[in-house]
Amino acid sequence: ELLTYLQSCQGEMVELLRRLVEAESPSTDKQALDRLGRDLTRQFESLGGVITPYRQEHAGDHLQANFGGASDDKPVLLLGHFDTVWEVGALQRMPWRVADGRAWGPGSFDMKSGIVIMLYALRALRELRGGVPRPVSVLLVTDEEIGSNSSRPITESLAKQSAAVLVCEPAQGRDGALKTARKGVGEYTVKVTGRAAHSGLDFEKGASAILELARQLGVIEKFTDLARGITVNPGVIRGGTRSNVIAAEAVAEVDARVTRLADAAELDARFRALKPFNPACKVEVTGGFNRPPLERTDAVARLYELARGIAEELGWKLGEAAVGGGSDGNFTAALGIPTLDGLGGVGEGAHAQNESVIIEELPRRAALLAGLIERVRNS
């Protein structure tokens, strides 16, 4: 019944997605984010949601919508974001279009289709069941793509009050697998201070920060342990002023990812323990892990099995995947709250020019989400 109803809404879902995509909302543009936030407020209010805005001075205002249910169970938290990596004007290069059974455009996959799925899952329950069977909270934040610094405390506070967290980030792959494990994400800055000198006149008086950094990167490279899911990537290097000046400073920005929380602590200790090879140089390490890993705990596995069973009833086989990228679901899972990720759109091209979603999957994902809202039980 849910699926049939939502399939009848497919055209409306695509039209709403168009509106959201064409309302460009980069993480760094508060005015654009707040404009879209006002539209989303109206959308959730039209379904009976009670809105709580979280005003931000710099980031866009975060949005919470609460729906009272027929029971006094703990709420289910639907989690997502409406900021994107695309600057205003990206639509000129990659305009909204519908072709080949897909909807294309910046933010369509990551993750405005997930917001459409949330809204229509709630709408289906309202139309077919008279409302949600239990309390539901929706939290849409505006800074997920840039680290969730202002929204993380809100996310964690709401998660602690919830029976489960359902994250409507994009699904994994063309088969729409759910994400039952995500790596933890860290970023480290390794700064080397050396001693400048003229490379011709006073070579021996210099201490090259660039050469020291190169030796440090040789050490850091060995931190990678693929068997344990640990990777480090020096993605940005800066240093020096001119070719005839021995560099006084060099900096590397290093991405770090781990599968287990315990590995994050170990890797952090290894970064902090870096020592200079050249005693005339100084090595300084800053940064750390900003997202803990989402580990596949028994609670996560039970939630996935519930989703898999619902999908089977709806007529398809739902898989699971472990992925390297992080989401705000990492925060909630690390608190021990049952968390299931990847419930959003099915498609490809997150953060890429070919960003798109498969249209016929939108009703199925909304039916799956509605089924989960109905069947999640308090832990």
Image: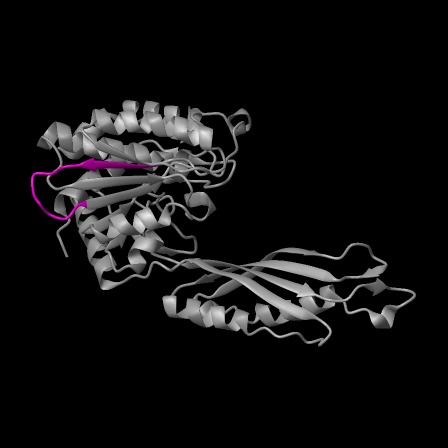
Residue 325 in view in this figure: yes
Left or right: where 50 falls relative to 116: left
Q: Which residue lies furthest to the front in this view?
A: 57
Q: In this view, does 229 lie above or below 101?
A: below
The x, y position of residue 28, in whole percent, is: 50, 37
In terms of depth relative to the viewer, which is nearer, 284 or 124? 284
Left or right: where 355 falls relative to 156: right
Q: Quadrant of the C terminus?
A: bottom left
Q: Is residue 229 above or below residue 240?
A: below
Tell me how many marks there are: 0
**Residue at 81%, 69% in the rendered image:** 206
The x, y position of residue 177, in whole percent, is: 32, 49
Q: In this view, does 245 lie above or below 150?
A: below
**Residue at 51%, 26% in the rendered image:** 91
Residue 293 included in the magenta stretch of the image: no
In terms of depth relative to the viewer, which is nearer, 274 or 96? 274
The x, y position of residue 149, in whole percent, is: 42, 48
Left or right: where 121 falls relative to 327: left
Q: Which residue lies furthest to the right in this view?
A: 201
| Colouring style | one colour
Q: Give the range drawn in magenta.
A: 62-75
Left or right: where 376 falls relative to 272: left
